[in-house]
Amino acid sequence: MTDKPGIVITGGSGRMGQMLIRTVLDSDRARLVGVVERAGHGWVGQDVGVAMGGAAVGVSVTDDALEAFSRAQAVIDFTAPEATLEFAALAAQARAVHVIGTTGMSAAQISQLEPAARHAVIVRAGNMSLGVNLLVQLTKKVAAALDEDFDIEVIEAHHHHKVDAPSGTALMLGEAAAEGRGVVLADVSDRGRDGITGARKRGDIGFTAIRGGDIVGEHDVLFAAAGERIVLRHMATDRAIFARGALKAALWGQGKDPGQYDMLDVLGL
């Protein structure tokens, strides 16, 4: 037996899934006990190391999430909103920490996590990196210090495979700016500009999404007033930072009371 928490990775064949698998395998603080893929996927039944093009690691890919979760102390999940909701219920049954890096979840979908959070720890964040979570705090402080003479724009760039926009990180930053201003983001969010849109509305928080190439993730928060601009920026060059943050969250959640947490809790911010 070992006291290292057992980790299951969902969506293991994806780019982020494979990065998470490597991160757990390389860790001396956790062990990989399962990898989940959808039914019918070509990886199901294979040793995950072989499926990834390397040596066997002794962990087979399965499409039975509940069985895999029952052997784990934590589940790390960077999949799709609908899958994440299903995994949340199963992780709660297994009393496993559920680390959610899935983006594109609606407010209604996020609210559906509440029943699972009554029974297990959920750590959900649009971005797992230390730098981004520091940027969130800085954004909140700057927004609180500046009045509506400063327009706020959140500008994000990602690779051309990303399917949701604005990114989860951009929405985190928008929420932080809104909180700093003492407003509700849904009331001031400006996400679409095309054609003759008219002048910008005072107090709005705008979003711009760029998609291209292999950009890992870049986020700017622009505060622009007459005669001056302030730009807060974070640039990710390696998605391993997200995997390391997710593993940190999975380890942090061990022994915590059931409930919903975020990376600010994990990082003590």
Image (cartoon, rainbow, N blue to C red):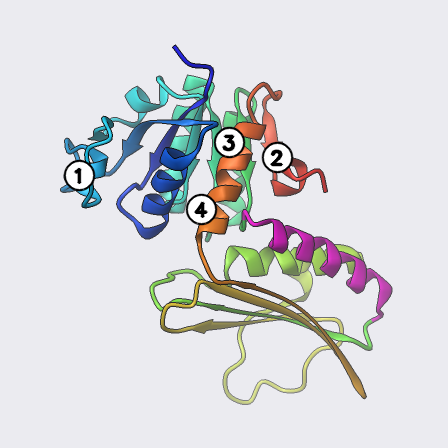
Q: CA distance from mark 2 to mark 1?
A: 35 Å
* Residue drawn at x 84%, y 68% as measured from the top left: 146
Q: Are marks 1 and 4 in contact (CB under 8 Å)?
A: no
Label 1 crowd bin: few (<14), some (14–19), many (20+), radius 10 Å = some
157 up-or-down from 10: above or below: below
For disc 4, the marked residue is 102
For disc 2, the marked residue is 261
* Residue drawn at x 25%, y 37% as measured from the top left: 37
For the N terminus, the quadrant is: top left
For disc 3, the marked residue is 250
For the C terminus, the quadrant is: top right
Disc 3 residue type (three-letter): Ala
The location of residue 239, given as percent across then percent down, is: 44, 54
Label 4 crowd bin: few (<14), some (14–19), many (20+), radius 10 Å = many
Q: Is residue 114 visible?
A: no
For disc 1, the marked residue is 50
Disc 4 residue type (three-letter): Thr
Nearer the observer: mark 2 or 1; the answer is: 1
- Please give left or right for residue 72 compared with residue 268 in the image: left
Disc 2 residue type (three-letter): Tyr
Disc 1 residue type (three-letter): Val
Q: Which residues are magenta?
A: 128-147
